[in-house]
Amino acid sequence: MTTRVLPADIASTVRRALNEDLGTGDLTAKLVPQGATSAAAVLCRDSAILCGVAWFSEVFRQLDEGVSISWRCEDGDAVKPGQTVCTLSGSTRSLLSGERTALNFLQLLSGTATTTREYVTAIAHTATRLLDTRKTLPGLRSAQKYAVLCGGGTNHRMGLYDAMLIKENHIRASGSITGALKQAKTTHRYMEIEVENEQELEEALTAGADAVLLDNFTLDQVRRAVQLNDGRARLEVSGGVDFADLAALAATGVDFISVGALTKNVRAIDFSMLLSDPDAGPA
């Protein structure tokens, strides 16, 4: 998938995150007078691709609809160190209670989007598309896959329910590549299967695979696989893909490169929320 649509589970995801952090209530925020109000600004400390606006905003919507947020950037925008991405105003207690949860979403999803943009840029001169995988943080798959789209990547299947990908253990359970594909043909029109060497690739192509995942192939093996395939199926490179090899892999002419590191090896982007203009009077 390449079309960017906000996930339907944002509210429930944020609700779980707030319950995790707030529990029975924010003990420290109670040090602030109940009626106090403040303004705040969220600054980015890194060069990054912004992502997570809807999750950040949803945190404060659930906590206190009286909190006002004004965004200066939107998902997918490139931001610089020291740049203010949004300003907030409202109850000081609410701003303090929502700060960490809101920033957690922003730093995680911006991290995924930023890494994705780096990978996409490395192969932008080719026709190869960058895919994500199912190696996501539990409970945050839809959010992270949205972040991949914000970074310019393409979504692979969302889960086990929306596309068939026959992997090593499925092949073992079915007895062979040919057997697995034969069984798959009874229920599915489009079939992708994982192979580990050129002999398995030939078997998969002969058995009618629509797409083949080349698992942990070396660069030379990928080149030979492209020649052997000769346009018969779509080819996806996956497994142990190093950033330094991206351009060379894409230059072989494969259709896709899938990278688990986009969503599982996340380097969070540094964001800070700073309060200003405290008002100890009633809101």
Image (cartoon, rainbow, N blue to C red):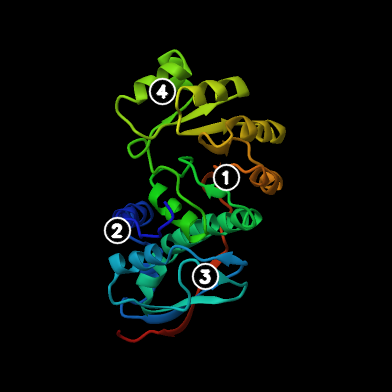
Identify the mark at residue 153; answer none if there is no mark: none
* Label 1 vs 3, first from the N-terminus: 3
Q: Residue 224, percent across and down?
A: 67, 31
Q: CA distance from mark 1 to mark 4?
A: 29 Å
Camera-nearest label, 4 or 3: 4
Viewer-proximal residue among 78 and 17:
78
Disc 4 or 2, which lies upstream in sequence?
Answer: 2
Q: Identify the element where label 1 is drawn.
A: helix
Q: Image height check: is 20 above or below 171? A: below
Q: Which residue is mark 2?
A: 11
The residue to which callout 3 is attached is: 77
Residue type pointed to by label 3? Asp
Answer with the quarter of the image where residue 65 lies.
Answer: bottom left
The residue that label 4 is drawn on is 181
Q: Residue at x 47, y 57 (%)?
A: 149
Q: Which residue is mark 1?
A: 261
Whether residue 263 is situated above or below residue 231 in the rendered picture: below
Q: Position of residue 81 (x, y in %)?
A: 62, 72
Give me the C-alpha separation between circle 4 and circle 3. 42 Å
Q: Amino acid at mark 2?
A: Ala
Q: Residue furthest top?
A: 175
Local crowd size for mark 3, using a 10 Å CA cut-off: few (<14), some (14–19), many (≥20): some
- Residue in front for this viewpoint, 220 or 233: 233
Q: Identity of the amino acid at label 4?
A: Leu
Q: Which is more toward the observer, 221 or 227?
A: 227
Q: Could you tell me residue 58's position as x and y percent?
A: 33, 65
